[in-house]
Amino acid sequence: MFDNLISVGALNIVAADSAAAILDENFHPLKIVACAAVLVTPPYRMASVNIAEPLFVNVEGGHELVVHELELCNKLLKSVKADVIHLDVSLGGINVEELSAAHLSSIVYGKARSHILKILPRIRKISDDIRRAYKIDVLAIGKESIPVRIAELTAGAYAILFTAKKCIEEGKELFLGLPAKCQPRKSENGIYMHSLIPAEHDIIGFAEDKERIMEKVIFHEILNPCARGFRAVKIQLK
């Protein structure tokens, strides 16, 4: 029994999520900014390793990002070892390779089902590739996963860096909507994104500012008046 407990406690998990959005003057989201993949190990409070990419894709196609998130997990697996992948699709933790159109018809309805059906062949193909290469499963666990939350916070932290860089390149002020219930903190070497959910007070995302981008901008944190529980940052040149 105790051997099993030790095995469970040592679970290394890869997860990914996309987060944060450029907002217009009315605080409406326009473009999703960042995607991050993370390796999360005990005690599961922040990423041990992460990679991130800028997106700046229209929010209308956000459901398609699950494919990119899984591809980024696959990319991370080339340099880290994991026991399982947590995918940001909330289907009770089922193995993605076991998903089918018939199965979805009994557990998901409406637009959500339509969106998953569109990406199902691609995520099953990537999951199969991962299974054959690394002998690990991809679980559709969604927001119940702490590693997915850490990936979301990590993507949010990187989104600040990517938006700041865009602000510098375009020479204009930008508003960035952050993930739900979190707060950014600037440090000397990057951005920390702290969860504000009470049971997650020690859950953190981090983005290293290797290019010292934040030294060139000013950012102010504000509440999003149109979305309770969400914050935003205004980023402008110094």
Image (spheres, rainbow, N blue to C red):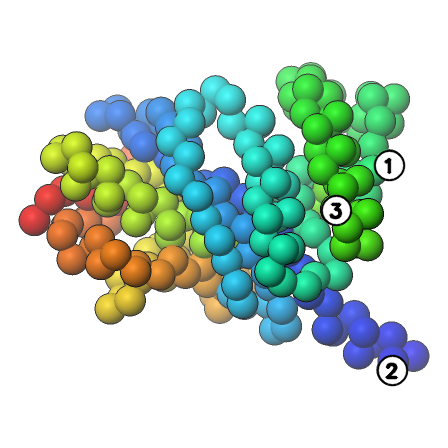
Q: Nearer the viewer, mark 3 or mark 1?
A: 3
Going by the numbered disc 3, the residue's amino acid type is: Ile
Name the spot of residue 140 as percent of width and height, x first. Answer: 73, 42
Quick one: label 1 or label 2, which is nearer the N terminus? 2
Task: Find disc 2 in the rendering and name its residue.
Answer: 2
Going by the numbered disc 1, the residue's amino acid type is: Glu
Name the spot of residue 90 as percent of width and height, x first. Answer: 69, 39
Left or right: residue 67 compared with residue 201: right
Which quarter of the figure has residue 122?
top right
Q: How many marks?
A: 3
Mark carried by residue 85: none
Task: Find disc 3 in the rendering and name its residue.
Answer: 130
Q: With respect to residue 14, does 131 lie above or below? A: above
Q: Can the viewer see residue 194 in this picture?
A: no
Name the spot of residue 214 as percent of width and height, x first. Answer: 21, 55
What is the C-alpha distance between the residues marked 3 and 2? Answer: 30 Å
Going by the numbered disc 2, the residue's amino acid type is: Phe
Q: Can the viewer see residue 21 in this picture?
A: yes
What is the C-alpha distance between the residues marked 1 and 2? Answer: 30 Å
Task: Find disc 1 in the rendering and name its residue.
Answer: 98
Describe the element under mark 2 as helix, strand or loop: helix
